[in-house]
Amino acid sequence: MDSISIFDKVTYNAKDQSISVSWGKSAIEMFKNLKGNFSKYFLTNVIKLQSENSVELYLKAESNLFKDNFFISVPDIKKIFSVNYKSIGDMKKRLINCCTDDININTDILLNAIDVKEGRKIVGFTFKVSRKNLLNDTLKKKIEKIKKNIHVSKSGFFSDKKVEKTLHTLFRTFSEKELEKGLELCYKTIREDFKTLSYLEKAIKFALENESAKEEKTKKKKETVSKEPEKTKAANKTTEDDWFSKFNNLNFVKKDEIEKKALEEFLKINKGQSNFISTMKQKSPTMYYNTLKDYILNLMTEDTSKEEVKAPKKRGRKRKLDMIDEIDKTEEIAKNEKAIKAFIKKKYGKEKMIEMLKNANKYEEIMFKEYINLLKEKEEKKNLKK
């Protein structure tokens, strides 16, 4: 097993608070031969380069992007690239111009070499370096949309000065399509102030994973409907493998009701384990639900037998409470966000509401749960009027 140092030297400049790096020799050789795994975005740039010298110059340019330029003397060029041209004209034509053209065509960097002279003699080259513009029309639209989110706008990562740097950083983790989709989804999911790009990356990942899970769930539902047009008792039977899937697919209200009852049954038999079981739910949800498995299964079986004898549905407009398992949670929350927050504020108070909604990962779950409570309250008020 080899251990490779990426950097040979790291220098901190206290005046402009910048850090400059020198790539390690072994690391450069690894990049030249494209061995091992590195950033996907980094590789997409390096892999297209036509020569090893272009890779060497690209790494140098990448290290000096924050300064916008860097200088290499003629002796250093000969040493770095292991060349010994008879004239500076040959060096410029065969090495400098070829490498800069290669980098400008095949990577995310634009490089321009300028002669540096002492008298008439060329003693080295100053390389002007900058990033290419990544803002295509689709990305512009997605960025304009996500900037309407007040927390994203406050962060400043998509301001005119920072947007290019932000995109280049995000492209190290996401493909173009993933980023476009992720930015669109994050418009709805980001609910708190943030100051780091790592937060934005996590939010995009969470949004993409959540969307992927929804698509997979929809796909499975469609497959089930096409394969089983008529539900039979055998199809409804809960097996050892799919019990949690069936439980998880229950509508929000029913699932919450069964879980509470199962927990009550468990605590009747296992007295004094209330704190233990609640801690287990936070640390290991899988273990938590497996502990309550038998209780949940019994309650689901009872519930299924009750559902077999149902009163005929009354005609008329379908209630929202009857459609809980059919509606799109994210869309419904977005439509009724103000009303839900007003309901939570009235019920728990402003400080408690802020605390409840602070966690971005649980925001949708809490909002949807309280949305159901809001619908129930409205239903009760209607019944009282009648």
Image (cartoon, rainbow, N blue to C red):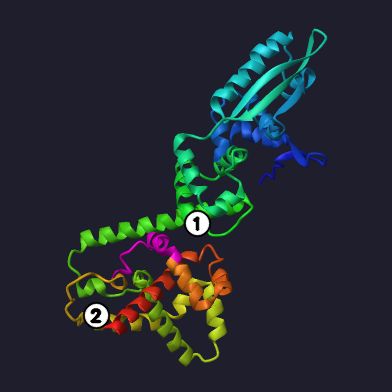
Q: Quadrant of the C terminus?
A: bottom left
Q: Callout 1, which amino acid?
A: Phe
Question: How far from the left and from the top, in percent, is residue 305?
Answer: 25, 83
Query: Label 2's element?
Result: helix
Q: What is the chief secondary structure element of the magenta stretch?
A: helix
User: Depth check: 148 or 25 in front?
Assistant: 148
- Was residue 86 drawn as part of the magenta stretch in this picture? no
Q: Which residue is mark 1?
A: 206
Q: Quadrant of residue 212?
A: bottom left
Q: Within the image, what quadrant is residue 354 found in?
A: bottom right
x, y percent for residue 306:
25, 83
Q: Is residue 94 above or below residue 276?
A: above
The residue under the point 18% across, 76% down is 314
Query: Front-most of 29 and 55?
Result: 55
Q: Which residues fall within the magenta stretch?
A: 323-338
Name the element at disc 1: helix
Which residue corresponds to the image point at 58% horizontal and 24% vertical from the top-left? 104
In the picture of the structure, the residue carrying the numbered disc 2 is 307
Q: Position of residue 46 (x, y in %)?
A: 58, 31
